[in-house]
Amino acid sequence: MRCLLIYFTGTFNTRYVSQQLKKRLESVGYEVDLYEIDPLNTEHLDLSGYDLIGLGYPIYGYNAPWPFLKFIRKQKFPKGIRTFIYKNSGETEKVNDASSLFVWRKLKRSKALIENEYHFMMPYNIHFRFDERLVKEILDMDEKLYDILIYEITHHIPNIKRYKLWHRIVTRAVSIQFVGGDVNSFFYKTDMEKCTGCGLCIRQCPMHNIRKDETGTIRFDHHCLMCMRCSFFCPTNAIHIGILQGWRVNGQYNFKAIREMTLDEPVITPDTQGFFRCYVDTYAYINNRHNELFGQ
Ligand SMILES: Cc1cc2nc3c(=O)[nH]c(=O)nc-3n(C[C@H](O)[C@H](O)[C@H](O)COP(=O)(O)O)c2cc1C
Ligand code: SF4
Ligand code: SF4
């Protein structure tokens, strides 16, 4: 059985999820290829040799990122091919589920079979930095979700998310990313007192939107998709991200080291309130479903 995982990633969280998924699918006998979308190269893939296609993306403003949508729209899905969606984001509010609306539409039009959809928790790359203890806990919880995904997909058990009308409306209303990045990039700038001129941001920008001018100053053009890769990975935290500056998160999460941590007590509990309240229901769902399938 051959599986292709097609995904878009900004700061590599979705790459991490895709790699975990690949390992899991291989452990049950699939031969798995990974395809990371390059926003500047919307090529046409030959999908005919695959039995299963996974579509992965990070949620951006309650939507799928535009490079992902553009790429998916361009593909010809063989009629009847089995597909599934795996998305990830920093919070699991139900409104995020409607982010797959356009993907669904495309798959249905192609008469592809779409029966499974999973929402993984990954730390924010914008807004605020997650505490490492919470990252450890959500990565552990995601491990259970991989178990569920693998079981349901290999046993042909559908698992579909339902969206309410107001979720769809919110998704539509906040699809600012389609123009927001280009507009905001007028306000991107680099603190040249901090910048070492290492060129990492230039090499890594998926839009080739960053350059050094003749004076050595880092400049931004206006084809930004707000992926945060430049500012997130800048080793000296020198990039100012325009109107989103107050939400800048800098510095990679070290998932390998975080996974090895031990937690003395849970971070999210049934009494958790406020921003992370949404995790209480998500944890409950994952734990219950995992217990149903695999026991305590
Ligand atoms: C422009 C932008 C918008 C985002 N919007 C949301 C959002 O609406 N909800 C959410 O939970 N996370 C949101 N996030 C956080 C990402 O979904 C999350 O950190 C994800 O794991 C990043 O994946 P990546 O590293 O593959 O790009 C947003 C991130 C960016 C850069
Ligand atoms: S990654 Fe940061 S330090 Fe390196 S060139 Fe870009 S702005 Fe300067
Ligand atoms: S300029 Fe920065 S945020 Fe914009 S596309 Fe390039 S790496 Fe992403």
Image (cartoon, rainbow, N blue to C red):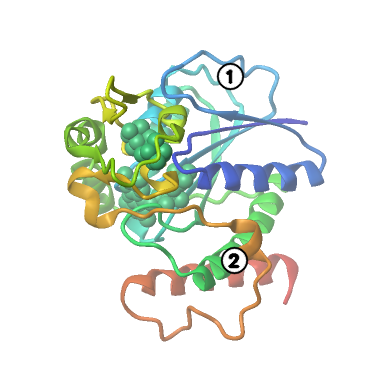
In this picture, is 215 found above or below 7? Answer: above
Q: Residue 95 location in percent, x, y?
A: 32, 55
The image quadrant where one finds the C terminus is bottom right
Q: Which mark is residue 78?
A: 1
Question: What crowding class fits label 2: few (fewer than 14 Cα within 10 Å), some (14-19), or many (20 or more)?
Answer: some
Q: CA distance from mark 1 to mark 2?
A: 33 Å
Query: In the image, which is nearer the foreground, mark 1 or mark 2?
Result: 2
The image quadrant where one finds the N terminus is top right
- Quarter of the image holding residue 49? top right
- Looking at the image, can residue 60 be seen? no
- Quarter of the image holding residue 130? bottom left
Camera-side residue of 194 and 223:
194
What secondary structure is marked by label 2? helix
What secondary structure is marked by label 1? loop
Label 2, on which residue?
141
In this picture, is 133 found above or below 62? Answer: below
Beta carbon at label 2 within 8 Å of ligand 1? no
Amino acid carrying mark 1 in the image:
Pro
- The residue under the point 41% across, 56% down is 124
In this picture, is 274 found above or below 92? Answer: below
- The residue under the point 78% across, 41% down is 26
256 to the left or right of 234: right
Camera-side residue of 112 and 57:
57
Q: Residue 90 location in percent, x, y?
A: 41, 58
- Looking at the image, can residue 180 be seen? yes
171 to the left or right of 280: left
